[in-house]
Image (cartoon, rainbow, N blue to C red):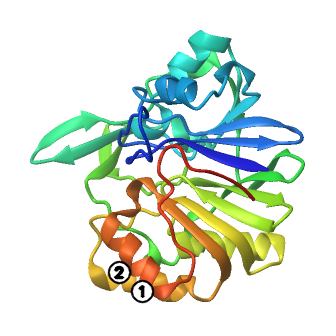
Amino acid sequence: MRLSFVVDDHCGRSPLLAEHGLAVLVETPRGTFLFDSGAGRALSWNARALDIDLRKVDAVIASHGHYDHTGGLAELVALRGAFPLYAHEAFRGHKIAVRGGTERFIGCHLAIDSVDFRPVRGVTEIAEGLWAVTTPLEDRDPALVPQTPALRLREDGEVRVDPMEDDLSLVMRGRQGYSVLFGCAHAGAANILGAVSEAFGTRSFYAVCGGMHLVGQKAEFVDAVIKALSAFDVACWRPGHCTGLKALCALDRAFGDVQWASAGTSFEV
């Protein structure tokens, strides 16, 4: 299996574009899959620069319903027609951000009937050696969940803090063993690895990649997460997107092989 980071907050080389978002191409012997689609500006441009044909994507897996992970979906529909979209049911929620008394819609703009929506709950096999995994709210240690009070959900006329029930990660079993790819890890990176460990019977992983939502979090929280993550045996860390550069440095101090997975990064798992 090969992971190619098509969209990230940082780009590794010219002529790639950076944007606040994430999109990762997952190539397997059983098919080609896109995990998230970025915010919509960089996906097609970067795909062309990386010689990736998005028309050959067999299905899309959405880590959650925020715009910076779903913004490229409409363009993908226009490019290749309806495709299977794997996501948690809560992906379709009316997601907003409230800052300074101003409300802004930050959810997915795609009409869900334009794709073949396939709901994910718990562990769902996408293809041989590839699973989408959600972490139920009751299985999350609140002390290890990122605090994001500005991210809210409008539901039945009321607004509340979004519990991010739709947070979803990807588990891959390749030649190197198991690897995990986060979207934003809104459920908490350590909570997700704990749930994966329980479901797959291992605490050893080759690569742990993607957004860990440690940017803007208190240093004490970042330290607590890193301490919890040290309970897992991980050969290499490839964080990106919402992890934050301060947290990247903290991860690098704690673990051996840590590198930012900027747009253009590609490696086998």
Amino acid, disc 2: Phe
Q: Position of residue 82 (x, y in %)?
A: 68, 16
Q: Residues within 10 Å of mark 1 (few under 14, many from 20)?
A: few
Q: Which mark is residue 221?
A: 2
Q: Position of residue 217 (x, y in %)?
A: 29, 70
17 versus 200 height, above or below: above
| Left or right, 31 with reference to 33 | right
The secondary structure type at the circle numbered 2 is: helix
When the figure is inspected, residue 22 is found, relative to residue 16, above or below; the finding is below
Which circle marks residue 106 in the picture? none
Q: Residue furthest left?
A: 100
Whole-Å distance between the Cαs marked 1 and 2? 5 Å
Residue found at x 50% / y 63%: 239
In depth, the one of 155 and 66 nearer the eye is 66
Q: In which quarter of the view is residue 257 placed? A: bottom right
Residue 111 visible to the viewer: no
Disc 1 marks a residue whose amino acid type is: Ala
Q: Residue 213: percent from the left, percent from the top? A: 41, 62
Check contact, mark 1 vs mark 2: CB within 8 A: yes
Left or right side of 136 for 247: left
Badge 1 is on which residue? 224
The answer to whether residue 19 is visible is yes
Q: Position of residue 67 (x, y in %)?
A: 41, 35
